[in-house]
Image (spheres, grey):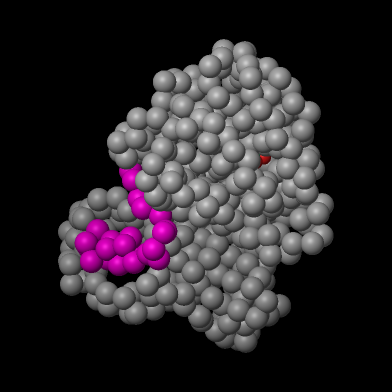
């Protein structure tokens, strides 16, 4: 069973003179949702029983839309970090009747004893939030001090899927489902999806080091490395340090060039927008660029899936990834050195972020690389055209072995 969602109504006395749910009430609704969730799990007294009180140390709330008296809000809650004495909860409030995202929040807690000293998080609480997951859902691995959510499926030669920004491992859902006979490993990079989102510590080299540590933890020697967009930038960094662990390379909707001055400035502007207006604003700004026109016009479910994914990304992870992308190295010199490494370059025909031209240049610079253009897809072929993308991957994997 998953952590239950909690539905709570908005009362008139919680709203300001204009009828909007006010800030103080937002806080108390988030808190009430947490207690209700405990009530349906280990019990509201789980902390007092263990002599460990969860003291809130930090709260970040992003307000996306107003809520009014009579609205019923659905609270979805996840544990994004579970340390020895501290933990972080992410909570999302959506209006039940139209599914509008109202607010997202992160609460950092430290468990303290009666003397105010840090004390371990009660095991019963951690077990309830960590292990009650649906089959096929992520496992957690702590890499370089950060807890990552990782999906690991199947047996066979390993394929490591690295998602882009500001997305998560579920962009590979259809490929993970389909690639039977392979060990599919798909982490949420730090700061995205269900992984921890520390305030600092983002760089392409750090993301790559997390992946290498993850492979160590899984006792996997080598992989076919499949990176989409920022996942491609991470893959270049991985190759610089752990080339011997890469059996084959798939570069999807990515580019080898570093950011120019204009792109660097745009990264800083996007980070400022994320800090000011939250992940929802980033989702609205990015959606038209992430998806091809065919998807936007004809596949509302995909549009909604991607919107939710981006809007659920912690602001710290967005800001961190933007800085990491802004400061990444140019990898064009790396491409000709990949001689002997089987490589596939995939790009959506309608990708405007990393267009087919960039893919052609990349494929031309890597000795013997193949290029596949996916019709009807923008920047996210695995989501927009899953079967075509899976077919291209399978063809390649058969050659790599
Ligand atoms: C991504 O999808 O990872 C990003 O769009 C890459 C970028 O902004 O350079």
Query: Magenta span has 132?
Result: yes
Residue at 33% across / 79% down in the picture? 39
Relative placement, left or right, of 45 versus 142 is left
For the point 29% across and 50% down, which residue is it?
Answer: 83
Residue nearer the viewer, 298 or 5: 298
The residue sitting at 78% across, 28% down in the picture is: 357
Instruction: State the image coordinates of residue 382 (x, y, percent, origin top left).
Output: 63, 48
Residue shown at 50% from the left, 48% from the top = 179
Whether residue 162 appears in magenta in the rendering, the answer is: no
Q: Which residues are magenta?
A: 121-142
Q: Quadrant of residue 269?
A: top right
Q: Nearer the viewer, residue 351 or 117?
A: 351
Please name whichever residue, 113 or 185, is drawn nearer the observer in this view of the structure.
Answer: 185
Left or right of residue 137, residue 177 in this image? right
Total number of numbered labels? 0
Q: Is residue 211 above or below residue 154?
A: above
Residue 46 lies, in percent from the top left, at: 24, 72
**Is any atom of residue 143 visible in this view?**
yes
Residue 220 in which image quadrant: top left
Q: Residue 290 location in percent, x, y?
A: 72, 47
């Amino acid at each position: 069973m998953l952590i239950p969602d909690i539905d709570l109504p908005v009362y008139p006395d919680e709203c300001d003179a204009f009828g909007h749910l006010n800030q103080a009430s937002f806080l108390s609704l988030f808190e009430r949702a947490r207690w209700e969730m405990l009530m349906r799990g280990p019990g509201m007294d789980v902390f007092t029983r263990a002599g460990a009180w969860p003291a809130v140390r930090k709260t970040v709330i992003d307000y996306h839309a107003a809520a009014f008296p009579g609205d019923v809000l659905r609270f979805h809650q996840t544990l994004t970090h579970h340390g020895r004495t501290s933990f972080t909860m992410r909570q999302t409030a959506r209006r039940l009747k139209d599914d509008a995202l109202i607010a997202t929040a992160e609460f950092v807690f430290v468990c303290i004893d009666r003397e105010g000293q840090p004390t371990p998080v009660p095991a019963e609480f951690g077990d309830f939030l960590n292990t009650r997951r649906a089959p096929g859902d992520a496992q957690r691995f702590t890499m370089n001090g950060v807890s990552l959510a990782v999906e690991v499926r199947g047996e066979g030669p390993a394929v490591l899927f690295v998602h882009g920004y500001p997305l998560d491992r579920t962009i590979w859902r259809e490929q993970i489902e389909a690639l039977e006979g392979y060990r599919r490993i798909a982490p949420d990079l730090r700061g995205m999806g269900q992984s921890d989102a520390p305030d600092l510590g983002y760089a392409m080299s750090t993301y790559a080091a997390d992946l290498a540590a993850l492979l160590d933890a899984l006792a996997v020697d080598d992989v076919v490395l499949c990176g989409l967009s920022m996942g491609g930038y991470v893959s270049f960094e991985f190759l610089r340090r752990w080339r011997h662990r890469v059996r084959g390379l798939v570069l999807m909707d990515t580019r080898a060039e570093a950011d120019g001055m204009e792109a660097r400035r745009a990264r800083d502007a996007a980070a400022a927008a994320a800090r000011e207006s939250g992940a929802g604003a980033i989702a609205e700004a990015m959606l038209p660029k992430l998806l091809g026109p065919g998807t936007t016009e004809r596949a509302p479910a995909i549009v909604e899936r991607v919107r939710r994914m981006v809007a659920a990304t912690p602001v710290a992870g967005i800001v961190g990834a933007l800085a990491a992308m802004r400061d990444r190295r140019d990898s064009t010199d790396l491409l000709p050195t990949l001689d002997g490494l089987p490589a596939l370059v995939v790009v959506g025909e309608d990708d405007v972020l990393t267009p087919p031209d960039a893919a052609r240049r990349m494929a031309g610079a890597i000795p013997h690389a193949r290029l596949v253009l996916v019709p009807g897809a923008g920047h996210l072929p695995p989501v927009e055209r899953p079967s075509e993308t899976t077919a291209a991957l399978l063809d390649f994997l058969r050659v790599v072995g």
